[in-house]
Image (tube, rainbow, N blue to C red):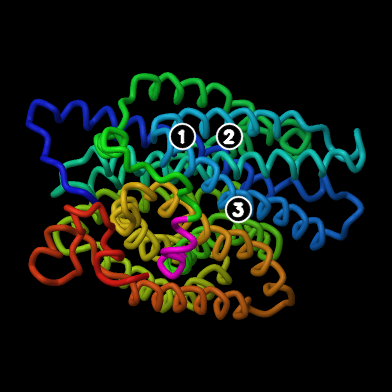
Amino acid sequence: MQQHPAPSPGSSPSMVRIASASLAGTAIEFYDFFAYGTAAALVLGPLFFPAFSPLAATLAAFGTFGIGFLARPLGSVVFGHIGDRYGRRPVLLGSLLLTGVATVAVGCVPPYASIGIAAPALLLLLRFLQGLGLGGEWGGAVLLTAEHAPERRRGLWSSFPQTGPPVGFLLANGLMLALSAALTDAQFSAWGWRVPFWGAGLLALAGLWLRRSVEETPEFRALTETGRRAEAPLTEVVRGHWRLLLLTGGAMAFGYAVFYAVTTWSLSYATGHLRVDRTVMLACVMAAVLVQGLATPLLAVLGDRWGRRPLCLAGSAVCAVWMFPFTALLRSGDPLLITLGCVVALSGMIMAFSVVGAYLPELYAPRIRCTGAAVGYNLGGVLGGALTPVAATALAQGSGPPWGVAVYLTLVCLASLACFALLPETNPAVVRTGAGPGLGADTGTGAAEAAAPV
């Protein structure tokens, strides 16, 4: 990442505003995404796929969940092009508006009993649009903070967008939990599950208001002034840095797999197979996500001090070791043991994801950064997030413990560990001590590009 002077003490409040706008946006957009995941685990199968068996209906609901992940790389390509050609700010506004409108519309789709096959078809379309918007959100939000932040605190400030997903999850599932506790099963299935989707409209308006006065980043302004903006960012990324793109996508996969195994598949498995009360299971998962959110900025500070790569290696290794204990604790059906399993799993995941808001942008040159970082991040979503609920549901059939799920998750974590091992360190403070390749500040290259042809 190109270097720029640290802001003066008087500029700190603007950095707080920038980070708050990024956090608010990612929280709102992930609220939209997570509301769908929870609904898919609890009610969408019977409502939109009633002709299927219970297992097939759950798989179909999770299939529509996966469509959102498949759309995310496309969204990162579209919004990444906008971000690299026209600025980071338009990405922040456009992605939030698209996701908000699509989410409200999901809450308005009639069930299969009312409009037949059009119901699941509309669900698929709206889920695709959700994913399209979310694919653009992450790149715009992290670049907004990373390119404004002082070098020595870049990891900390860039962790604010990474705190947004836990906040969004807690908002979505807190509302689901309240509705689940207050309504009968019939009321929840009839209309209660729709309320979180309708609430997304108000949240989107609030997010647009927060982002209305956000300034363009210094690095994009410098690219504009020097005429160095990429004409075709995706072409540059694919032709010149395809290996880096595949490594970043593979590295991100484990975090998505672990997160959605904990927050989506385990919810369906525990309530369906183990007969754990829906409200109790939501509370277990929410407690783990709360710990994840609180730990994110604390771990990011360690990333500023010791480097991004060590935390990523440690996080993927912890998750690889923990997947079998996690499965055993979930299988116990005991709420305290389930919560413990979820807390450790998400803590390992966030060790890496607390720093990727700084790490991925630092790997790519400013002219292709919005496209490269966003596509790599969302490619990990396809590899790790789209398939995990479906694969885990299929592997967990039968009366015995779902060890197949543990094997699947462990293999994903090990693959990501290997990808992190092949990526360089990017933290400027660590690089200057000789522990990394350098950022190529004078040439505008990213860390991986400065290290070797990728």
Q: Which residue is mark 1?
A: 91
**Amino acid residing under circle 3:** Phe
**Of marks 1 and 2, which one's residue comes earlier in the chain?**
1
Report crowding for label 3: few under 14, some 14 to 19, many 20 or more residues within 10 A (C-alpha): many
Which corner quadrant of the image does residue 202 belong to? top right
Quick check: can you spot residue 160?
yes
Q: Nearer the viewer, residue 244 or 251?
A: 244
Which corner quadrant of the image does residue 407 belong to? bottom right
Q: Which secondary structure lies at badge 3?
A: helix
Q: Nearer the viewer, mark 1 or mark 3?
A: 1
Cα distance between the residues tagged 1 and 2: 12 Å
**Of marks 3 and 2, which one's residue comes earlier in the chain?**
3
Cα distance between the residues tagged 3 and 2: 13 Å
Q: Is 62 placed above or below 195 here?
A: below
Judge from the rendering whether residue 194 lies leftward or rightward of residue 283; answer left or right.
Answer: right
In the rendering, which numbered label is found on residue 275? none
Q: Which residue is mark 3?
A: 69
Q: Nearer the viewer, residue 131 or 123?
A: 131
x then y, percent, for residue 160:
31, 42
**Amino acid residing under circle 1:** Val
